[in-house]
Image (cartoon, rainbow, N blue to C red):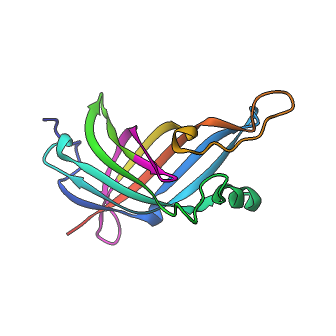
Amino acid sequence: MTALPTGLSTGTWAVDASHSEASFTVRHAGISKVRGTVAITSGTLTVGEDVESSSVVVTLDPASVTTGDANRDGHLKSGDFFDVETHGEWSFTSTAVRPAGSDWVVVGDLTIHGVTQQVELETVFNGSAVDPFGNTRAGFEASVTISRKDYGLTWNAALEAGGVLVADKVKIDLDVSAIKQG
């Protein structure tokens, strides 16, 4: 039984989608990186008496993908990549939480493009605070690197000099604010 971090109380916490973000980074053409975001639409953190009895459930909207280029965003939403018409929601459901030094690992099932894979999110608790409106908030950061091929995202184009246009490895970073519920 691992104690909760100082400042994190038991109970249900709702993810504040307007103050949370899922971002990604992928190497492009082998020489640069493309960065983007996908909206977190909802989520619940259930904090138990100890870390091991805590859980996380989050949903994301792939139709909200934004990379700063409308044409690229449209391509990502198409059948070549996310196929948002068929796979309009992504999700993460934790299966375990364990300490990792002074931080945490949240293990769970990540579903993207209709494919579910187990991932381990390296997670940091940033503390808690009461906002000006009387809400108790908790902040978290988490990251994981996935293989997009593991999720059936295989579209690519060969480069004249060798290699491919879009790398397989994608780094996902989460910045989450959650509000303590009644």
Does 111 sit left or right of 29 as displayed? left
Residue at the right extreme? Answer: 160
Magenta span has 113?
yes
Camera-nearest residue between 9 and 171: 171
Q: Is residue 40 above or below residue 49?
A: below
Q: Quadrant of residue 85?
A: bottom right
Q: Quadrant of the C terminus?
A: bottom left
Tell me if residue 132 is in the magenta stretch: yes
Q: Nearer the viewer, residue 46 or 149?
A: 149
Which residues, given as a range, are shown in magenta?
110-138
Q: Would residue 87 be found to the left or right of residue 47 on screen? A: right
Q: Residue at x 79, y 35 (%)?
A: 158
Q: Main secondary structure of the magenta part?
A: strand
Which quarter of the figure is the N terminus placed in?
Answer: top left
- The x, y position of residue 125, in whole percent, is 34, 44
**Location of residue 119 with respect to 81 vertically, above or below:** above
User: Where does residue 157 sit, x and y in percent of width and height?
Assistant: 77, 40
Q: Position of residue 55 (x, y in %)?
A: 25, 50
Give me the residue at 33% from left, 55% from top.
57
